[in-house]
Image: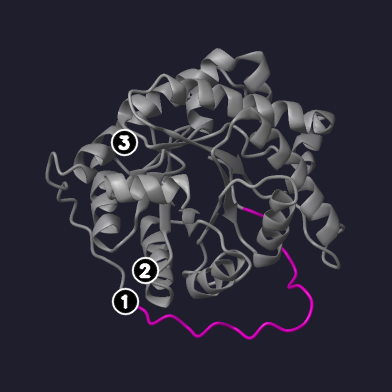
Amino acid sequence: MTILQELIDERGVLLVDGAMGTELFARGLGSGGAPELWNVEHPDRVRAVHADYVAAGSDIILTNSFGGTGFRLQLHQLDDRVVELNEAAARVAHDAARDADRRVVVAGSMGPTGELLEPMGSMTPETCAAAFAEQARGLDAGGADVLWIETMSHLDEIVGAVEGARSVSDLPICVTLSYDTAGRTMMGVSGADAVHRLAELGVAAIGANCGNNLTDTEAAVAEMHAARPDVVLISKANAGMPEWHGAELRYSGSPDVMAAHAHRQRESGVQIIGACCGSSPEHLALMRRVLDREIEAPDVGYEPPPRREPPAPRERRGGRRRSGVGGPEQ
């Protein structure tokens, strides 16, 4: 039994943290800067973000390592420091979790490489797996409790990530995809496609994060649940839709909106619930109160998406499907 299942059995539903990137920008991270570098240059500021989410009631906190593969770090000339920066990310999060008055799980965030698998791009299955293996090695060494592969869009890259991670670590693995195109990922993967394929890999939990809107995320997770009700599910949606207010980009999802969303997800059978882009400790604190049934879910006038029957799993042909790029950071 994984630590996640133990805590689900104990607490019923687990709360994951919210956005990291916007919290770091508020603390001085410059546009175009590498968030992962802050794990060694400003660990106190990164730790403060984790501590705020722990104080808000999060049971799981994600490390500041979303762009921590060599492919992503190469954009900042940091690809020779992959293990160092990921180990530091896990260590900073572990320090914040250790000070909590309850068990808080440290999840090692592993985002997409941003590359295409051959022949559409130059990344091979072997280099894909090697990139995630290198990142996983650092996260494991730094004290992560689980590995959290997130914001993915194509199953081949996920398979490479899982294979790479398992080649260097025995930690449980969670996977979430980003649904933003009519209920499918950028590369056309449905909720049913994902849950059937990933359940075969034996990952600890499967779900959706980021995405175009709450409706697409909820519909994708509902499709997963209908296809495989035995799987532990994750929902970590964006806080509504991004909207321009003058020169400032804000997300439309208030804490009330996200708290109502958390209630709907719990009632639909999702065991691990959090928030992604545009969210803050304020959002998570209200979500916590609703999930604990301390307060009623806010009435935000939401119309749930129509129920869709999950499609049958596609027959897999020999070889790998081609990969796409992942979605945006938090």
- Judging by the rendered image, the residue that carries numbered circle 1 is 307
Horizontal side of 161 relative to 120 (left or right) equals left
Quick one: SS at disc 2?
helix
Magenta stretch mostly in which secondary structure? loop
Nearer to me, 163 or 259: 163
- Judging by the rendered image, the residue that carries numbered circle 3 is 283
Q: Is residue 289 visible?
A: yes
Residues at circles 1 and 3 in contact by the CB criterion of under 8 Å:
no
Indicate which disc residue 222 carries: 2
Residue at screen point 37% across, 23% down: 100
Horizontal side of 54 relative to 182 (left or right) equals left
Task: Identify residue type, mark 3.
Answer: His
Question: In the rendered view, would you say 257 is above or below 186?
Answer: above
The spot of residue 128 in percent (x, y) is 79, 54
Question: In the rendered view, would you say 246 is above or below 252?
Answer: above
Question: In the rendered view, would you say 218 is above or below 248?
Answer: below
Q: State how many labels appear.
A: 3
Nearer to me, 31 or 262: 262
Residue at screen point 65% across, 24% down: 88
Residues at circles 2 and 1 in contact by the CB criterion of under 8 Å:
yes
Q: Residues within 10 Å of mark 2 (few under 14, many from 20)?
A: many
Q: CA distance from mark 1 to mark 3?
A: 27 Å
The spot of residue 270 in percent (x, y) is 34, 58
Mark closer to the chain start, 1 or 3: 3
Task: Identify residue type, mark 2.
Answer: Ala
Query: In the image, is residue 319 part of the stretch drawn in magenta?
Result: yes
State the extent of the magenta-drawn residues as a range: 307-326
Q: Residues within 10 Å of mark 3 (few under 14, many from 20)?
A: many
Nearer to me, 88 or 301: 88
Depth check, mark 2 against mark 3: the one in front is: 2
- Most extreme residue toward the front, as rendered? 1
